[in-house]
Image (cartoon, grey):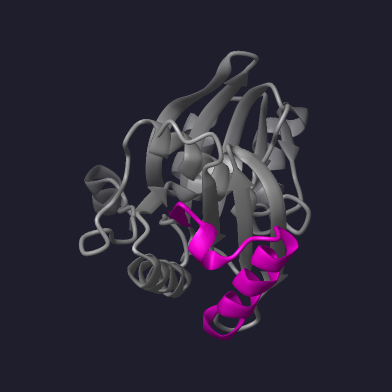
Amino acid sequence: VGDKRLRILGLDTATWRGSVGVSVDGSVVAERSQRSRASHAAALLPLIEETLNAADCSLGSMDAIAISNGPGSFSGLRVGLSVAKGLACATGRPLIGVPTLEALARTLDGVRGVVWPLLDARKGEIYAASFEAAATGWTRLIPDQLLSIAALLEILPAPGVVLGDAVPTYGDALRERFGDGVTLLPFDRYGPRGGVVATLGWERWQHGMVESVATLEPAYTQMASAERKSA
């Protein structure tokens, strides 16, 4: 923990945008992202190699592997976690799970106020969380949860900044409900970042939050039972 040159490899495949980053002592030194039309399986390893080369690092020089482990795309999370576990086993390095929605929110470096990261869970449902960004740091306001758009509109605090791949689908509904009280960020410019996952992995490392390769699983957030009954 006291190593002044702690290198973390970060992976994010929770959406159709795959991203890989390397952080050193909590600062991003290289990052590459790529859109996947089908599966991340074919593109992820070349993207990792490209990012490591850009960072002038080898896989063996990494101190830990950080993986965005949900909620998000079931298949995407499985691919990312399988690769992360494989790299951790091959190198003997520890594995660090990073909440996907927190990592997405934290891509907004320098923002102040309420941030809502929203991912499209399909079938009219959304993976949602809420954070407040202040000069002193980030505070989680609500836990990760699976909501219908109607339920989300009831609890979304405005004004706020909204980002994630749910914005293209539900942006009109959000704008109709809150008007100028929400700032909608386009997903193609404000998507997941592997470097942020690596940085959050570094932060969690400082607190001993290391996962077991054998037991770490994707975080598949379920809809609250009360809402399931009324859906």
Q: Residue at x 63, y 73 (%)?
A: 49
Asked if the stretch drawn in magenta spans residue 143, the answer is no
Q: Is residue 164 visible?
A: no
Which residue does the image show at 48% across and 71% down from the upper left?
Answer: 76
Residue range of the region highlighted in magenta in the rendering: 40-67
In-front residue for pair 72/157: 72
Q: Residue 227 at what x, y percent from top left?
A: 30, 46
| Residue 144 shows in this picture | yes
In the picture shown, does residue 114 fall above or below 6? Answer: above
In this picture, is 39 found above or below 92? below
Determine the residue positioned at 56% across, 64% down: 15
Residue 226 picture location, percent across and down: 24, 43
Quarter residue 79 falls in: bottom left
Q: Nearer the viewer, residue 136 or 31?
A: 31
Tell me which secondary structure the magenta stretch mostly adopts: helix
Identify the image quadrant of the C terminus. Answer: bottom left
The image quadrant of residue 70 is bottom left
Magenta span has 42? yes
**Residue 68, percent across and down?**
47, 55
Horizontal relation, residue 70 to residue 46: left or right? left
Horizontally, residue 188 falls left or right of residue 85, namely right
Q: Is residue 214 rendered to the left or right of residue 100?
A: left
Depth order, front residue of 136/190: 136
Q: Residue at x 70, y 48 (%)?
A: 29
User: Which image quarter holds the N terminus?
Assistant: top left
